[in-house]
């Protein structure tokens, strides 16, 4: 292990100390007191030393946690411990929990390595993690209707401890659904997607059933495009496109967004994708033939001619729906989280 003395305070991070204060009310007082800090880190194996096996991430974490506990015990003037530059803890909490650094699940001191951050969406209390991705590759976002803050925090803590200890292959699968239990009276869905609050990947736990009436339905392709784009007008004439069809609908939670005003960039992207479908000589010829068939009253032939473009529009709708669910796309501007 290495210990480096830095004769200056760490840069002040308002959010770090605010999160720390949820468990440690004196956190901001400690931040004002400190004048220097120690950087503690494992050195790693010496190159060419074939007798010593390099430690993996988890082993380095356990070793560093225990070692920092020893440093805190030896230095009575320590005012705080900052883990990985993100997580602030009191020296008392570190001394108490670091002695379990090498304990197995569920007794490992995961509370030293990550934060659980509460938020509110509408009437639903949720929480996300910060620091878990170093162990599991993803953070957690937990947004299940009908639970109080204590239950939410407890559930996220249980899930986090499991993910830290579990084999990645045994983790929660994308699309998995949990049945109701003693605390949650409805089904909970698991999705691997992007975070609502940053660009990182998360395991999302959310209510599959809209028991609190939070979900509203929106058209993927809006009326402003459906009623004016030449391709969709032709497809609608032959019965290949209906803006009211479930394929063109998606359920979203308005409280996830700043407002329900559609992003211009989203609709412009849809219009451009539709226009690319018809910017070919093949479509120009198909359009002429389909119009001729309609003029003769031959709906079946017109429908058959336009089938490939109907399939392409359907693929676009499906891809956009998936991207909205995974948060690769946004129909509305995402809202920042609000603390309970």
Image (tube, rainbow, N blue to C red):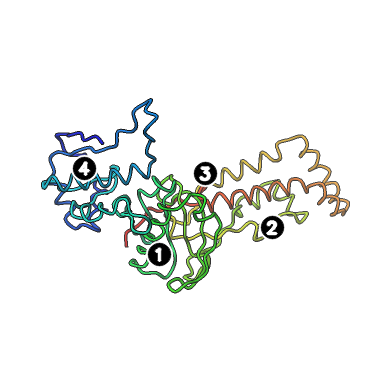
Q: Earlier in the sequence, mark 1 or mark 4?
A: 4
Q: Outermost residue toward the front?
A: 51
Q: Secondary structure at mark 2?
A: loop
Q: Secondary structure at mark 3?
A: helix
Mark 1 neighbour density, 10 Å: few (under 14) some (14–19) many (20 or more): some
Gap between marks 1 and 4, in whole Å? Answer: 32 Å
Q: Position of residue 95 (x, y in %)?
A: 20, 53
- Considering depth in this image, is 85 or 264 the residue closer to the camera? 85
Discs 2/4, front:
4
In the image, is residue 76 above or below residue 178?
above
Q: Secondary structure at mark 1?
A: loop
Name the residue that disc number 1 marks.
122
Q: Is residue 323 left or right of residue 39?
A: right
- Considering depth in this image, is 282 or 1 the residue closer to the camera? 1
Q: Position of residue 138 (x, y in %)?
A: 44, 48
Name the residue that disc number 4 marks.
12
Name the residue that disc number 2 marks.
242
Q: Is residue 81 left or right of residue 183?
A: left
Q: Position of residue 180 (x, y in %)?
A: 50, 71
Gap between marks 3 and 4, in whole Å? Answer: 37 Å
Q: Secondary structure at mark 4?
A: loop
Name the residue that disc number 3 marks.
265
Q: Outermost residue toward the top?
A: 48
Q: Earlier in the sequence, mark 2 or mark 4?
A: 4
Discs 3/4, front:
4
């Amino acid at each position: 292990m290495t210990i480096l003395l830095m004769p200056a305070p760490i840069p002040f991070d308002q959010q770090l100390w605010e999160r720390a204060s949820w468990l440690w009310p004196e956190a901001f007082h400690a931040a004002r007191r400190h004048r220097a800090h120690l950087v503690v880190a494992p050195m790693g194996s010496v190159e060419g030393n074939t007798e010593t096996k390099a430690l993996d991430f988890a082993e380095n974490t356990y070793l560093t946690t225990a070692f920092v506990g020893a440093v805190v015990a030896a230095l009575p003037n320590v005012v705080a411990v900052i883990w990985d530059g993100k997580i602030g803890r009191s020296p008392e909490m570190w001394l108490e929990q670091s002695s379990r650094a090498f304990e197995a699940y569920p007794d490992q001191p995961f509370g030293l390595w990550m934060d659980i951050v509460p938020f509110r969406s509408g009437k639903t209390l949720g929480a996300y993690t910060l620091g878990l991705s170093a162990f599991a590759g993803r953070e957690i976002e937990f947004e299940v209707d009908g639970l109080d803050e204590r239950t939410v925090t407890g559930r996220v803590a249980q899930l986090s401890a499991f993910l830290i200890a579990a084999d990645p292959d045994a983790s929660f699968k994308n699309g998995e659904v949990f049945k109701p239990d003693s605390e949650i009276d409805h089904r909970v869905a698991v999705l691997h997607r992007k975070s609502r609050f940053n660009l990182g990947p998360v395991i999302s736990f959310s209510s599959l059933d809209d028991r609190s009436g939070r979900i509203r339905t929106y058209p993927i392709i809006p009326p402003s495009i459906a009623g004016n784009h030449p391709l969709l007008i032709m497809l609608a004439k032959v019965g290949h496109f209906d803006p009211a069809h479930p394929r063109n609908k998606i359920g979203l939670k308005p409280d996830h967004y700043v407002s329900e005003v559609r992003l211009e960039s989203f609709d412009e992207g849809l219009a451009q994708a539709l226009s690319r479908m018809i910017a070919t000589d093949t479509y120009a010829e198909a359009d002429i033939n389909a119009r001729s068939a309609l003029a003769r009253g031959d709906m079946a032939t017109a429908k058959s001619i336009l089938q490939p473009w109907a399939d392409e529009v359907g693929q676009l709708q499906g891809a956009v729906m998936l991207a909205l669910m995974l948060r690769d796309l946004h129909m509305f501007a995402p809202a920042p989280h609000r603390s309970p």
